[in-house]
Image (tube, rainbow, N blue to C red):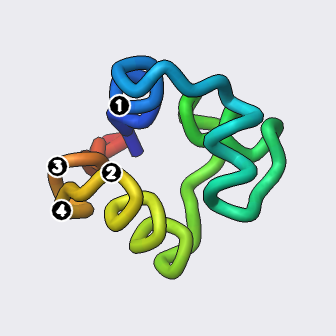
Protein backbone atom coordinates (compact mmCIF):
# COMPACT_ATOMS: atom_id res chain seq x y z
CA UNK A 1 0.00 0.00 0.00
CA UNK A 2 1.29 3.43 -0.91
CA UNK A 3 0.82 6.33 1.48
CA UNK A 4 1.22 10.10 1.56
CA UNK A 5 2.17 10.14 5.25
CA UNK A 6 5.73 11.37 4.70
CA UNK A 7 4.50 14.25 2.52
CA UNK A 8 1.78 15.23 5.02
CA UNK A 9 4.13 14.89 8.01
CA UNK A 10 6.85 17.01 6.41
CA UNK A 11 4.31 19.68 5.39
CA UNK A 12 3.55 20.12 9.10
CA UNK A 13 7.22 20.12 10.05
CA UNK A 14 6.92 17.03 12.25
CA UNK A 15 9.60 14.40 12.73
CA UNK A 16 8.73 10.73 12.62
CA UNK A 17 9.06 10.69 16.40
CA UNK A 18 6.61 13.60 16.79
CA UNK A 19 4.07 11.95 14.52
CA UNK A 20 4.45 8.67 16.36
CA UNK A 21 3.82 10.40 19.69
CA UNK A 22 0.68 12.07 18.31
CA UNK A 23 -0.58 8.71 17.06
CA UNK A 24 0.52 6.61 20.05
CA UNK A 25 2.96 4.49 18.02
CA UNK A 26 6.73 4.27 17.76
CA UNK A 27 8.95 6.18 15.35
CA UNK A 28 9.81 2.81 13.82
CA UNK A 29 6.14 2.18 13.05
CA UNK A 30 5.86 5.56 11.32
CA UNK A 31 8.98 4.77 9.31
CA UNK A 32 7.66 1.34 8.33
CA UNK A 33 4.36 2.83 7.14
CA UNK A 34 6.14 5.56 5.19
CA UNK A 35 8.42 3.07 3.45
CA UNK A 36 5.61 0.64 2.66
CA UNK A 37 6.98 -2.13 4.89
CA UNK A 38 3.91 -2.07 7.16
CA UNK A 39 0.23 -1.46 6.48
CA UNK A 40 -1.48 0.21 9.45
CA UNK A 41 -4.44 -1.37 11.17
CA UNK A 42 -7.82 0.14 10.37
CA UNK A 43 -8.06 1.95 13.74
CA UNK A 44 -4.57 3.44 13.19
CA UNK A 45 -5.47 4.45 9.63
CA UNK A 46 -8.52 6.30 11.00
CA UNK A 47 -6.36 8.06 13.64
CA UNK A 48 -3.92 9.13 10.92
CA UNK A 49 -6.76 10.42 8.73
CA UNK A 50 -8.29 12.36 11.64
CA UNK A 51 -4.93 13.87 12.61
CA UNK A 52 -4.29 15.13 9.09
CA UNK A 53 -7.97 16.02 8.52
CA UNK A 54 -8.08 13.92 5.36
CA UNK A 55 -10.05 10.95 4.11
CA UNK A 56 -8.32 7.60 4.42
CA UNK A 57 -8.55 7.21 0.65
CA UNK A 58 -6.53 10.40 0.09
CA UNK A 59 -3.74 9.18 2.39
CA UNK A 60 -3.54 5.50 1.42
CA UNK A 61 -3.67 4.07 -2.08
CA UNK A 62 -3.93 0.33 -2.66
CA UNK A 63 -1.36 -1.04 -5.06
CA UNK A 64 -2.17 -4.39 -6.64
CA UNK A 65 0.91 -6.59 -6.54
CA UNK A 66 -0.09 -8.61 -9.61
Disc 1 target residue: 8
Q: x and y percent of residue 11 in the render?
A: 35, 20
> Which residue is drawn at the image coordinates 20% and 56% (left, top)?
54
Q: x and y percent of residue 41 in the render?
A: 57, 72
Disc 4 target residue: 55
> 33 left or right of 26?
left
Disc 1 or 4, which lies upstream in sequence?
Answer: 1
> Which residue is drawn at the image coordinates 33% and 33% (left, top)?
4
Residue at disc 3, secondary structure: helix
Disc 1 or 2, which lies upstream in sequence?
Answer: 1
Are the residues flagged by discs 3 and 1 in contact, CB closer than 8 Å?
no
Residue at disc 1, secondary structure: helix
Disc 2 target residue: 52
Q: Nearer the viewer, mark 4 or mark 2?
A: 2
* Residue 51 image-quadrant placement: bottom left
- How many angstroms separate mark 3 from mark 1 (CA)? 11 Å
Image vertical order of residue 4 relative to residue 56, above or below: above
Disc 3 target residue: 58
Residue at disc 2, secondary structure: helix
> Which residue is drawn at the image coordinates 33% and 61% (left, top)?
49
- How many angstroms separate mark 1 from mark 4 (CA)? 13 Å
> 62 left or right of 35?
left
Are the residues flagged by discs 3 and 2 in contact, CB closer than 8 Å?
no
Residue furthest front in the image: 13
Are the residues flagged by discs 4 and 3 in contact, CB closer than 8 Å?
yes
Amino acid sequence: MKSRIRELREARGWSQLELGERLGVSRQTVNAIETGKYDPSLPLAFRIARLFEKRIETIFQYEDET
